[in-house]
Structures are given as structure tokens and as C-alpha cells.
Image: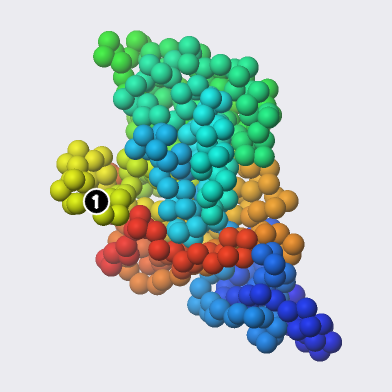
Amino acid sequence: MTDVTGTEAAGIHALGYDLLLRGGRVICPTSGIDGLYDVAVRDGRIAAVAETILPSSAAEVIDVSGKLVLPGMIDTHGHVYQYVTGRFGLNPDMVGVRSGVTTVVDQGGPSCMTLPGFRHFIAEPAETRIYAFLSAYLVGGLEGHFYPNLYSPDGVDIDATVRAANANKDLVRGIKGHAEIGGFARWGIKVMEMAAEIGRQTNLPLYVHFGTLWGLPESGANGEDADTIIERVIPLLKEGDVLAHPFTRHPGGFVNQQGEVHHIIQRALDRGLKVDVGHGSHFSYRLAKKALAAGVVPHTLGADMHGYNTEVPPPAGTPPEHYDDENHPFKGQARFSLTQAMSSMLALGLPLEQVVPMVTSNPAKMLGLTDRIGALTPGFAADISVLHDDRGRFLLRDNEDTRVVAERLLRPAFCLRAGRRFDADSPILPAAVAA
């Protein structure tokens, strides 16, 4: 792109912009832009991206020099069915626009039975753009580790879930299933076979959780081996389906109990399956290093924040003594966010140019929405994330308490959602910790 000058500039001034983001490092993988550019917004949409746009052409100018300016970030793994999914569900805007994220995908919160409530009470009123991967289970994303029997084959209705997904594809962009030792020990592979069938009949991507979740039944593991689950599940899956939690610290993930990456993973990637980090409390730096060394580079970077791994502040006006929950599962865990997960990828040796697509263009492809999100394309809604790019020595840690010193830390400054500004003031964002 070239400078906007002469008669072209005069024309722009006559038209006028509502907002100009000036002087930041703009990275848009879709268009191949990476450099110092200005971004202009008009009527809630991207109007222009150029090396220089006259400040006088805009009603408001924001100096973003020294910051990163990205297409609105997309969190591919959220839990935002607030209240309905027990303590799992977080406020969608706390995870979304107030954390610098313009789009959040709820992973398995709503089911075919509860989807209307998700649309009416979560997606429609949220300032954040919200989508869902519909649960394969009738019960949806309740606190399954307390009630695992709700996730048996009897709790799956293929026809009803297919009907709901097909009737709501403006909101439902995929299906969520679980491949973990607790379920396999109870019921074998049947539930995953049913989830895969829902994915085939809807022609939507199936997002598959790997790593222990519900634990073993009291009677034992019934002869099941966590290390064989991934080898049995991958043949069920189709191109575009998503393998989640590649760096999980729990049994049943990409790295077996001998510390080796399953050989089937590379074959799965070769035939078009995708990988989502699904950070959450599963993430392990130790195992991430092993998987990355074996060539397993994630396509997308879901944060997987929920009420059990995020320090949620008490409701306004709540006396502290009424909120002192000594059993809250967050206690002692590391705080994280989508930008913190990006910083972890940088600390593991991936370049920024490889990390940015994980939260922009690649998620847009995963959702089948490259025609409207994930890029700074003129005419698209002005969904833009602006990040601080701090340099120094920062301490990051995972929930194995492995500590990593990062020389670069990304933090959200603010975002624009359809041209409207939201500062990154979410109380769940982690604080920078100097090493």
C-alpha cells in the first residue's frame, strides 16, 4: 500500500472517517499486511488501511504507536453460558471485549435443549460477538465432573442435536465432544461415535476434548488405557475436525505416558484435522515443548477460561465473608487469558507472525466465517484488537507450576467491536509479573 496523498486524500477528507487508529504495527495475515499502518473506521466498518491517512480526515484519532493492531481476536474455546452451566459459565463480555477479544466461541455450553436460552440470554445481549459449538450431550456443559452419568450414550440424541444445529447455523458453528478416560472406562467409544455422526450429518467441525476430565469410575478403568484413546478416536474424524488440548498435562493427550508424541497425530494433520490449544488448566509447558519439537503446531489458540480455573470477583456489594470459598478450585492456579496464551507461545519459541493467525485468520476459517471476521478487510465490521507489546523479563507459569521467563508479554489495551471502543478492564485478566 502507498501513502494517501493529493486528490485521493482530498476525497477521503470529504467523506470523513469516524475513527483513525494511527501509527501501530498492523498485522493482518489474510491481506499480508505487517508494518506501520493507519486504520480508518466509518459507520462501524473498516474503511481503509494505508501507510498514511490524514488525521484531519477523522473525527477522532487514537495514537497506537508502539502497539499491535490486529483483526479482532477470536477465542475458539470459551465457557460463557453464565448461570446455566453452574460455576463453569463466565460473563461473555468479561471473557470477550473487556479482555480485548471481539469474538468468543462457547465450547459445548448449550445443547439442543438449551440453545434457545443461549441465544436469547447470552449471544443476543452480549457486546462480544458470540458463537457456539453445540454440545453432543442433551445436558450440555453442566458440571460434568460432578455428574458424569449425564454424559452416557443415553444422554445423546443424534437426531435432535442435528435438527437444532442445522436450524441455527447462524449461531452454531460446530459440535463439541469428549474423548477422555472417564467416559471410555464407563461406556467405551460409543459416545464419540455418536458425536462424530452428529458432525457428519451437520457438516460442521467436531471439536474433541482429549485428556482426563471426569475421572475413572469407582469400579476401575474396565480395562481401558488412556494412551489408546486418541488412536481409536482419530479414525472417526473428518477433515476440519479439531483436536483439543494438545499440551494437556492429563493422561490421554497427544503425549503418551512414556513421554512420546503419538505417531498418529502427524497422519491426522496430514489429512486435514486441526489442533486447538484449549489452554485452560490443562496446559503444560513441559509437554508443549515435546509436542512442538515433534512438529505439532496448533492452528488455533482457545483460552478455555471458565469458573473453575479463573478467579472471578464477587458480585458487587457482596460482603467478603460471604464469598470466602476455601474450596474454590482456582486457589493456587495460574491466571491466564487469550493474550497470556499468546505470550506462552512466544516464550516457547514460536514467532509472533505464526501466533497472530492462531487468533485471527485461522479461527475464522475454522468457523467458516472468513467472509466477515478475522481480517482487516475494508467493508468488514470494525472488529479490531489493540495490544501492548511489552519487553523485559516476565514470569509465566502453568498449573504444574513450571515457570518460564518470557522476554515479551502481550497484554490487551482495548478493542473495537463494530467500531465501538471497549477498554481492557476485565477483572479476570492476569497481572504482569516481573521475573
Q: Residue furthest front?
A: 317
Three-letter code for the amino acid on which mark 1 is drawn = Thr
Q: Is residue 397 visible?
A: no
Q: From the viewer's perspective, is 224 left or right of 53?
A: left
Given residues 71 and 291, the one toward you in this image is: 71
Q: Which residue is farthest right?
A: 7
Residue 369, how many percent across, how many down?
68, 46
Single out the residue that lies furthest toward the bottom. Answer: 6
Residue ID at (48%, 16%):
155
Image position of 33 (left or right of 221)? right
Name the residue at 63% across, 75% down. Answer: 19
The answer to whether 32 appears left or right of 192 in the picture is: right
Is 357 rendered above or below residue 292? below
Residue position marked by numbered label 1 in the rendering:
318
Task: Please state which of residues 224 and 255 is positioned toward the viewer in this rendering.
Answer: 224
**Number of residues whose C-alpha sits closer than 10 Å to that of mark 1, classed few (under 14), some (14–19) or many (20 or more):** few
The residue shown at (51%, 73%) is 67
Which quadrant holds the N terminus? Answer: bottom right
Q: Residue at x 36, y 29 (%)?
A: 143
Q: Nearer the viewer, residue 117 or 291?
A: 117
Please state the horizontal and vertical placement of residue 381, each as a whole percent of the image. 67, 59
Residue 36 to residue 218: above or below: below
**In the picture, residue 119 is in which quadrant?**
top right
Residue 230, percent across and down?
48, 26
The mark tally for this picture is 1
Q: Quadrant of the C terminus?
A: bottom left
The relative height of residue 323 versus residue 239 in the rendered view (above or below) is: below
Tell me residue 421's x, y (percent).
Answer: 54, 67
**SS assignment at label 1:** loop
